[in-house]
Amino acid sequence: KKKVFSGVQPSGIPTIGNYVGAMKHFVKLQDEYDCTYCIVNQHAITVPQDPKELKARTRELAALYLALGIDPDKSNIFVQSHVPAHAQAAWIVQCNTYIGELERMTQYKDKAAKQESVSAGLLTYPPLMVADIILYNTDFVPVGDDQKQHLELTRNFVQRFNNKYAKEKDLLVMPEPMIPEEGSRIMSLQEPTAKMSKSDTNVKGFISLLDEPKVILKKIKSAKTDSSGVIEYDKENKPGISNLLTIFSAFTDKSIKELEAEFAGSGYGYFKEQLAEAVIAVLEPIQTRYKELLESDELDRVLADGAQRASEIANKTLHKMESAIGLA
Ligand code: TYM
């Protein structure tokens, strides 16, 4: 079986953007691929985090993975900091990556602009992500559009490292991004030209997977639209409605064309109510399972077992890398 790896940061509760762009696909992929899904808490500390909150969010994200339908008998779920090989491999990656490459990363530039002081880790975050991916001999990485550049960096690294150090056959597996055709970039409900983000200070901009139904309805009702009153997909001129159509499509598996036909002549108010209903119909059962899981000790067992299985694979790759460069 081909291998899939992906991760989500416990820097907030995942949003419907994370769901549509990545997490929804995690579930679908597990029958066809050998999947590993990580809670990347070491990535989260590249910007300030409250320790208690970070710890709670890490466990909550694990519960959410399971509640979404990721099955620990099929996929491996673990917490990044439980597997030291990630930080170890990241150091080797950093020493074979150029500062110029890292300074070009748009996510770094965006995040750095928002911080009062920028940690070195914010700059060297992509090499840690490279390490995550290569340690598991990953073939495919399901992510949203904003991770595309980090995946390109990963591919460049793999090629460079293999060229330099692989004696005969390739040392590291070349990964490929898996970016959904639709919904790879869900926009903020308040500012539909900016990406929806779980760390947005304006909570009306995003819907978290744990928002209560009445909050979901309220946020969707107050989503920014335009004054034309026509429900059609036109990203340039109608970014708000186009974003809502994309979300609607992702939550119902109806195409945007079908939705345009269904809501031709309807008002924005009615359209938004129907959208809220569709989102709630998917999220409510997930939230119910989530609450049960958070209280069970099944979660701790899954994570302990996950870290052990992950370590075995990761340490093998790390050892190969260390041998190749003369560290072992
Ligand atoms: P993170 O935690 O920011 O986001 C998790 C996943 O959600 C996708 N995503 C979106 N998709 C659509 N619309 C949006 N508005 C939106 N916002 C986020 C992201 O693209 C991502 O797939 N660096 C990663 C985590 C990571 C990782 C990895 C991913 C660390 N190591 C190795 C893959 C492989 C991140 O910050 O994701």
Image: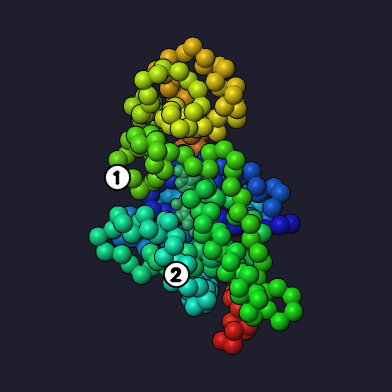
On the image, the x and y values in percent for residue 136 come to 62, 65
Q: Label 2: which residue?
A: 100
From the top left corner, tell me how far across and down residue 211 is, in percent. Answer: 39, 36
Left/right placement of residue 194 relative to residue 35 reads: left
**Vertical relation: 181 (above or below) 120:** above
Residue placed at 59% from the left, 43% from the top? 180
As measured in the structure, the alpha-carbon distance from the residue carrying label 1 to the one carrying label 2 is 30 Å
Q: Which of marks 1 and 2 is nearer the N terminus?
A: 2
Query: Does dot 1 land on a helix, a strand or a loop?
Result: loop
Task: Single out the residue that lies furthest toward the top.
Answer: 265
Q: Quadrant of residue 10?
A: bottom left
Q: In this view, does 287 lie to the left or right of 120?
A: right
The kind of secondary structure element at disc 2 is helix
Residue visible at 29% across and 45% down in the picture: 201
Q: Which amino acid does label 2 sit on?
A: Gly
Specify the farthest residue to the left.
Answer: 116
Question: Disc 1 vs disc 2: Cβ atoms closer than 8 Å?
Answer: no
- Crowdedness near tag 2: few (<14), some (14–19) or many (≥20) residues, C-alpha within 10 Å: few
Vertical placement of 246 versus 29: above or below? above
- How many residues crowd mark 1 within 10 Å: few (<14), some (14–19), many (20+)? few
Residue that label 1 marks: 201
- Mark 1, ligand 1, within 8 Å: the answer is no
Q: Which residue does the image show at 64% across and 43% down from the upper left?
A: 28
